[in-house]
Image (spheres, rainbow, N blue to C red):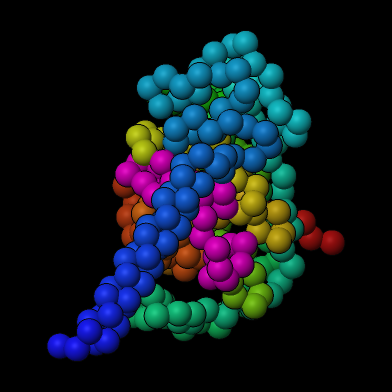
Amino acid sequence: MSSGRASQILGLLGALVLACFAIGAVILIALRFRTESNPCGYELQALGPVCCAPGQLVKDGHCVGTDFSCPEGMLRVEEPHPGCVLENQVVEFEAGRLVLGPMDWEAEGRVAPRDVKVGPFMLDSLEVTVARWNLCVQAKTCAKLPGYLEPGQPVTSVTPAVADRFCMYNGGRLPTSDEWLYAALGSPARRYPWGNTGLVCRRSAFGLVNGPCAEGAVAPTLAGSRPDGMTPEGLHDMAGNAAEWTREGKGFVARGGSFKSEQAADLKAWASEKTSTPSPHIGFRCAYDMPKG
């Protein structure tokens, strides 16, 4: 081999080594940013997989402590335990068309094309929280939830029938799958509730058990704690945190993915979990018929 040829090979090897170092540095910076950045909104602080008020600590996967103040935009609630709660709003949706079809390669074989008329209807901006449920308990209409639960956490581990009865108590019902999808997708249809790109930890409470956003979660975090993932209409957590019960035909399906989800396909608006079994990662929000006249 000539000396010139050898010099070329060494030069290429050197460039390859430098490129590998550069790629490694970018990956390390990205991982550091992902780990050190705060995905929680409303000036909440990220403590491992949960969002807590400044001054709180984490114990057994939950925010605890009484010496704290809730950030602006959140209410302090004392029952069943002290915590911060984002106030629920009811969002109106005029009648429209749900146009659903394979939006990308991940949807192939999972999404049946549909074009149906939906609405009008109204939908909670938040997943039903422990604080809202506790009001029903105080009225002796709902059963007390077991375990340590923060007021701002979504209610989970209830059957679709129990969730539907809670909604009826509040003048509503569980949303149909078409209503839920129309609220999550919008028109034209979005891949995610906030848009077509950018599944990141500050927009969705996902991957909180084994990564990529955190590790060790045992339950959903505070409802609405990812305001960057809010829909244009003002709905929180339509992807991630707690999956949500919806009516589909004569049964139920859970939609939207949860804090346990790790794959992007599980967080897209069309993703669903066909089950009717109560689970710690499945909650709900209520829908309401639009007043007539």
Q: What stretch is highlighted in magenta?
A: 191-214
Whether residue 206 appears in magenta in the rendering, the answer is yes
Q: Which of 62 and 97 is in front in this view?
A: 62
In the image, residue 110 lies at what x, y percent? 36, 75
In the image, residue 71 lies at what x, y percent? 71, 28
Magenta-colored segment: predominant secondary structure: loop
Q: Which of 206 and 43 is in front in this view?
A: 43
Q: Which of 199 and 237 is in front in this view?
A: 199
User: Would residue 66 be seen by someone viewing this image from the given angle?
Assistant: yes
Whether residue 165 appears in magenta in the rendering, the answer is no
Q: Residue at the spot x=76%, y=31% of the render? A: 72
Q: Residue at the spot x=61%, y=25% of the render? A: 53
> Quarter holding the C terminus?
bottom right
As displayed, is residue 282 above or below residue 196? above
Q: Residue at the spot x=45%, y=58% of the render? A: 26
> Quarter holding the N terminus?
bottom left
As displayed, is residue 191 above or below residue 215? below
User: Would residue 81 be seen by someone viewing this image from the given angle?
Assistant: no
Q: Quadrant of residue 39?
A: top right
Name, please, the residue furthest toward the left.
1
As displayed, is residue 12 above or below residue 175? below
Image side of residue 118 versus residue 259, left or right:
right
